[in-house]
Image: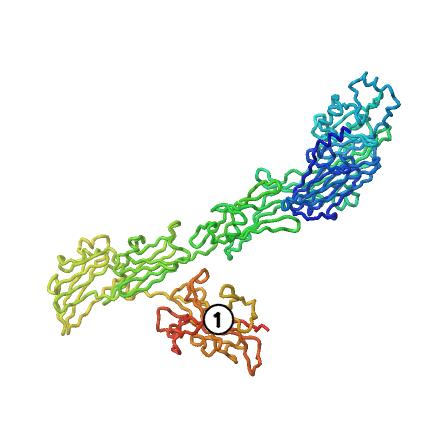
Amino acid sequence: MIMAQILLLVQWLFMIAVTISAQKTLKTTGLRPQCLGNVMRLTIDKSFTIGGQLDVDAINGSHYYPITQSIAPACGYKKTVDHWGNVKLFASVLSCYTQNQDDEDFDVKLRLTMNSEQKSDKADVHELSKTCKYNQWAAREILCDQDYMEVSVNRLPPPIDPAAYPEEDQWVGAVPEAVTSEMNIWRMVFFTPREKSMLLTDAQKLGYFVSTTPTRLVIRSHPNKTEIYTENVAKVSMNVLRVTTYFKDLWSVTMLDSAVACPTSGLVFTEETITWYVPRHIHPLLTSNTCETLEVHMGIDGERLDESQMLSKGYTMSVTDNHVVLELPVGGPDGYYKSQVSQYQYHIMYCIEAMFEMVWKEAGSDLLTKYKVLKPITTPLMPRPPHVLDSTVPDERIFDVALGTFLHDVILVNITFTTGVLTVAEANARGFNVQEHRFANGSKTFSLRVPFSDPVVLKSNPQRELTTYTLPLIFGLLVLPEQSPFSHPAEPEVTLQDVVFPVVTGTCDDENYYITMALESHGNDYKYIVGKRELNADLASEYDVRVNATHMTMRVSFLSSDAVFTFVIPSAAGGRLDFKVIDPINKWSLTDFSLACTFPMPLTECHTNGTMTALALKVESAPYVIPSQLTLIDRSCKPVFSNDQFASFSFAVNTCGTVRMFLDDHMIYQNHITMPDQAAKIGSHPEYRLTVSCYYVNDDIKMIPFIPDDLGTEPFEPQIGFGEMSIRMRLASDFYNTFYSEDDYPVVEYLRRPLYFEVELMDSTDPELELFVESCWATLSNERQSTPRWDIIVDGCPNHNDRYMATLHPVTADARVQFPSHFKRFDMKMFSFVQDNVVLKDQIHVHCDAAICDRNRQSDGLCYRQCSSHPGNEPSIKSQGKTRFSPRSTAQLSSGRILLSK
């Protein structure tokens, strides 16, 4: 047969890509063939096509014919894949290779081959056979699909027996072009709407499927053929194919008209509803002006729905004078949503495989037309811009951001930070927490957690006390399987009142100011002002500035020009050093610290050789004084040395205008240090006058103090503040990495297994403090002074009378331990109290007394003695017998209940 020869030349491979992995033996429970009138539907479960590619072959006898996507429309096949990966294969009962028995039984045989990517040398094969019975043929049946148009009509009368007509050769010679085909089809005339005649072979070359069955003529075409024209029917655009087929048998010629018209428009969309208008009277298919509509039906996936099914699913169908109107809710249960990207923005669309059937007959005729439309409907793109949900809890100092929602076919590929692009795997490996969250309705979101401390987080200070943390992001996403990229930016922001101003403290000795500043998290990014000068490299060297990971220290001489004198008293002078910390970016003064001290120093000295020395200080209340311009009464007597802070005089008691006086048994020499008149006239400053005197009585020396009038006679007293420090004891579940919380008690442990205890001084950043564990003991109850009692640590050292003596562990700095001196660690062996070889109770409580000591005060007794060494012990807790000690603070600590495991 010519048709069979043509089809043998075509390799028909129908490839369906899915997302899940193949099983070795296909199970028929996942293949669901179903006969639906003149259409067979095969549903292939996603489990069949896992991880590979599904090939479908049609079986005709002992031959296998691969199905290709290009020829599927001509042969009456169509496939769909839903959003879960399930495949539906539709086939007309008049499709290629279907075994037809008297146009009543149609046997569709298929071979399914799964070619697994993991098993390239071995494929899983399954053969399927389904017989559909369909004998209620109308005179004309029309099947409209998105991919093809099919019409079948009652076949012409039976062929004439050639033996009865011996004159055949004469007919052929007379009309040589009238060559009879094996199907008796001579030629075909297409109406476009102009007539276009061609032989059957030419029509087949153009891609038309033409075949005869025992009772019917079948014509099938792709909708894009040039012989198909468009006609508007009741405002619905339709593709129309009209053709007359000529049959020749010997000397007779018979013609048969066929027509098919399929709608290409008629859909109206809203956000909630799809309305489908189908013309009620399809004029290109009618030969008269009137026809009677006998039946109308709607369905899904080729299967009719009854009224109760339509009602339960929200479908409606109505008939007007010109149309049959079908309404389907967007988001209904028989369809599915699909993601799409348009202009790099996220959209979704709703897809559903609708069906419409109608039966009519024309006036004056009993011939029926059955009309079926399989209509895949896709809504216009609906924008669904993702939303960023910021669930950040500021106190946790971790950004917690979610992006969504998306359909199942969207994946998160990467995230762009300020420092670069990271894939999801790279972001998780870096310590971020990127997760996908799926919901029952099939949607999903993506979440991201990033610590405030990470370099990808930008920090700024809108006010002195506030820090703003910003996390600029761009999420990079893909829609599968199209691999369509799109992105969405996010910029979560949190502002906290978390600025910790630098803590500055200071002390003095007889000659220097000492400044200490805790760097905290500030580092060296700030500007420091000493007095009125910025601390640069030269000044830092002069002041012996030292910086480590936690502190900065400096030493400034009390005679430095950056310090000021505030008052003078006999044999001493009061001074002050100002120290400021400034934010150079915002020009904010973060810390304004002043250190006031009194320095012992002789301002006037009287020598036995008859000379006097005097020191005149420039005090803060007399800023106009220029020490180098000070003189004695005799203005020719100038300082022997001067700088910006003081002037030093040395002179004989009988020179420089010194006045000598007698008082009882005393002889007094007195002089004045003043500014010259011309210098004192600058502005409205009062006269600077300092009286220096020497009393000679049995070599006794007296000095008269200078105190400015506006400062009073008493120096300013420092204000004192008070605070509290906390100590806690915790039991570790391993070697000091993780610890039990209060909710974990009672803790269960085996006999003689080590219990790791850690005692910690909390909330202190003073490196000069040291934690001391004085004693630890165990009791049966939580009462510290209850009995029986067993000592574990005595006077800071393990109990030497304990057979399983406790072990003291050294503490070193790490990510959690900033000041090792604030921690003490020891372990003991789990035990139980026994009396007369009977366990009193299978539990213990551990209690400790701890103290806080000053590391600089070696007289603190118990805090600074050395434990004697024992095997397995480290001398890390220092003690000194029963010596009394004076710690700054003490604490009483107790553990929760620890049970002995049985």
- The local secondary structure at tag 1 comes to strand
Front in this rendered view, residue 508 or 617: 508
Is residue 485 at all visible to an observer of this figure? yes
Quadrant position of residue 49: top right
Relative to 834, say whether 113 is above or below: above
Could you tell me which residue is drawn at 52 percent across and 79 percent down? 786
> Residue 625, percent across and down?
22, 56
Q: Quadrant of the N terminus?
A: top right
- Give the amino acid type for the residue marked by disc 1 in the picture: Asp
> Residue 565, percent across and down?
26, 60
Is residue 266 at all visible to an observer of this figure? no
Classify residue 636 as left or right of residue 730: left
Q: Quadrant of the C terminus?
A: bottom right
Front in this rendered view, residue 858 or 484: 484
Location of mark 1 (residue): 827
- Graded by Cα atoms within 10 Å as few (under 14), some (14 to 19) or many (20 or more), the crowding at tag 1 reads many
> Residue 678, percent across and down?
18, 53
Query: Of all residues shown, which one is farthest toward the right?
Result: 164
Quadrant position of residue 5: top right
Could you tell me which residue is drawn at 54 percent across and 46 percent down? 414
Classify residue 738 as left or right of residue 292: left
Front in this rendered view, residue 468 or 9: 9
Query: Of all residues shown, which one is farthest toward the top?
Result: 174
Relative to 107, say whether 589 is above or below: below
